[in-house]
Image (cartoon, rainbow, N blue to C red):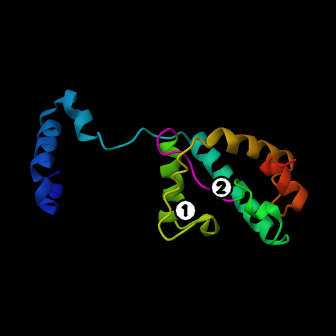
Amino acid sequence: MRILEKLYPEEAAKFSQNRTALEEGFTLHYEWVFESIRDEMSKEECQEVLDILDMYRAITFSLRKIDQSDELQDHHLAKFIGFDGNNEGQRMHYVRYFIVDLERYDELKQGKLPTFNSHTRMLPTYQKMFQRWDELKRNFEMPREQIARVLGVV
């Protein structure tokens, strides 16, 4: 906290207060010190997000191999839009961290600074899609019929 006080003089008073709470053992105030830290995501929740990203990688690359005028190209679920910031915020932040900060899944980026905020709950939809993709043995090279099945068109 002393280092942060020096690095960020405009926030020095807050860091000083937090340092005092920690140094003096004022456990009631520990929550205040760490209030900006979010609840953690379980390994299973993180893996579920990565599975969804893998599914979208498969959809994206498979769509590139079919006719570009095919109606599936414009299907509302054909592109990964992220998670709802209000109700699925942890997942949205994890996607942004994984794609933007760690520079993975570049093919799923849309725009220079993607937010991955879908503004609508997407997890139940993605879970249904993933179940259908899983039934296809998580095929990364899907023909049109399989893409349509995963998207729920058929």
The magenta segment: 79-87
Q: 115 left or right of 52?
A: left
Question: Residue at coordinates 66% horizontally, 38% vertically from top-left?
Answer: 124
Q: From what the image shows, is residue 90 above or below residue 148?
A: above
Judged left or right of residue 12, residue 134 is right
- Circles 2, 1 touching at the beta carbon (< 8 Å): yes
Residue tagged 1: 99
Residue 81 is a magenta residue: yes
Q: Check residue 53 in the rendering and tell me which mark sits there, or answer none.
A: 2
- Chief secondary structure of the magenta span? loop
Q: Position of residue 4 (x, y in %)?
A: 18, 56
* Left or right of 31, for residue 145: right
- What's under tag 2, amino acid-wise? Leu
Q: Is 90 left or right of 59, judged from the image as shown?
A: left
Q: Residue at x 84, y 54 (%)?
A: 148
Question: Which residue corresponds to the image point at 57% horizontal and 66% vertical from the top-left?
Answer: 110
Residue 77 position, x and y percent, is: 70, 53
How far apart marks 2 and 1 lie (CA) works out to 9 Å
Name the element at disc 2: helix
Near-viewer residue (28 or 134): 134
Disc 1 crowd, CA 10 A, few/some/many (<14, 14-19, 20+): some
x and y, in percent, of residue 134 in the image: 80, 46
Residue at the image point whose x is 76% and y is 67% from the top: 61
Q: Is residue 112 magenta?
A: no
- Where residue 121 sits in the image (x, y, percent)? 58, 41
Disc 1 marks a residue whose amino acid type is Ile
